[in-house]
Amino acid sequence: MSNYIHYRDYTGSIEFSEEDAVFHGKVIGIKNMISFEGDSAKALTEDFHNAVDEYLELCEKSGKQPEKPFKGSFNVRIQPELHRQAALAASARGLSLNAFVEYAIRHNVNQP
């Protein structure tokens, strides 16, 4: 079972509150807070779609560009010594630091 739901290039988390007997979630990968909920999978899906559609309509009406999730760049802070080691390892392999980090992430994401 997936803990995510997808619609129009947006991804939402899925959680369940046993106390409230409701599924809920929020759109991940953007700074704006977009949340949704439902008491069934169908209701959760509908509310997620409505929340994304309302966000996009609001952006259009206000003339703002909607945030695009997962643009392909992010800032990572690591210890200076690890930064140095990664840069040297990348150089030894003839890779840029970005390519080295992308490889490391890809390798770890694809692990079971």
Image (tube, rainbow, N blue to C red):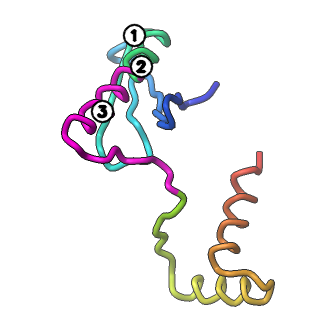
Which numbered disc flags the more N-terminal residue, 3 or 1? 1
Q: Quadrant where the C terminus lies?
A: top right
Q: Quadrant where the N terminus lies?
A: top right
The residue under label 3 is 55
Region of the chain picked out in magenta, as a range: 49-71
The residue under label 2 is 23
Q: Residue furthest left?
A: 62
Report x, y in % for residue 45: 46, 17
The residue under label 1 is 39
Labels in figure, total: 3
Main SS of the magenta segment?
helix
**Residue at horizontal 52%, vertical 28%?**
5
Mark 2 lies on a secondary structure that is: strand
Q: Amino acid at mark 1?
A: Asp
Q: Name the front one of labels 3 and 1.
A: 3
**Residue at horizontal 47%, vertical 28%?**
14
Considering only vertical position in the picture, is 104 above or below 4?
below
Left or right of 2: which side holds 110?
right
Q: Is residue 75 magenta?
A: no
